[in-house]
Image: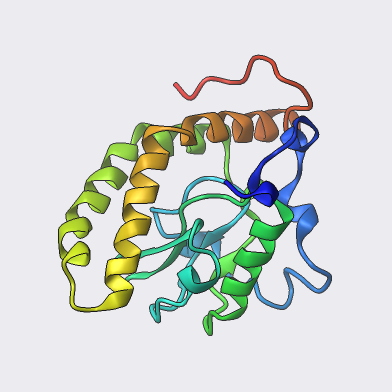
Amino acid sequence: MSPEERMSPVELYWEPIAALPEGEPETSFGGRWEDRLWLNVPGPFYTGVADNCWTGRLYAPRHVLYGGEYFGEYVFRQPATTVEVQNLVTAAQDDPYRGYACDGDSRWTPDGVRDWWRDRGEVTEYLESLLPGWSSSDRPEEREAAGGLRDFAAYITEGLDADLRKYLFRLEEGCYPKSAGPLPELR
């Protein structure tokens, strides 16, 4: 993990939306909640109808993958640093459909987050269904994205639960936790 990707205790309560550059979200974020791809991980950032040109991973490989009916872009990990937010903004800026959105905090509910977590097995099965074909593909972008599939699957297994519990705290209390302590359960 790079130094800019590590979170200090002070960053435990960091608000990702506050790291958006001036002029955002108006410039690059036009995605609609109603169009949200089911693979998006709960959090402030998500995609609705996004392009399928497979450019998002060029800018935000730790956060963007491709999937759904048309293999559009989606957010599989929420940004945790200012640098990661900027990477996601750059991916959004390259999307001709303006399908990225950053209003998830006003859209997700605690029950919605828990439902997503409860149904994560469907996400894992979907990732597993794509992995063999992408891993052995003649297309370099598919082979690269296979690494993202593995990364997302590993994140679901280890790490996503803690991040979603912090996000539940944010939704229920109006801010991220300011100190270590009990967090809401995902069940």
Left or right: 103 as drawn, with respect to 155: right
Front residue of 5/40: it is 5
Relative vertical location of residue 47 with respect to residue 124 in this rendering, above or below: below
Left or right: 183 as drawn, with respect to 122: right
Q: Residue at x 51, y 50 (%)?
A: 77
Residue 176 x %, y %: 73, 34
Left or right: 2 as drawn, with respect to 33: right
Does the image show residue 69?
no
Q: Residue at x 69, y 51 (%)?
A: 4
Q: How many labels were placed on the picture?
A: 0
Front residue of 61/178: it is 61
Residue 75 x %, y %: 49, 57
Relative vertical location of residue 30 with respect to residue 111 in this rendering, above or below: below
Judged from this view, the residue extending furthest toward the top is 182
Q: Residue at x 57, y 50 (%)?
A: 78
Relative vertical location of residue 25 with respect to residue 39 in this rendering, above or below: below
Does the image show residue 27?
yes
Left or right: 88 as drawn, with respect to 61: right
Look at the image and tell me in which quarter the C terminus lies.
top left
Front residue of 143/163: it is 143
Q: Residue at x 46, y 53 (%)?
A: 76
Residue 122 x %, y %: 27, 43
Residue 74 x %, y %: 45, 62
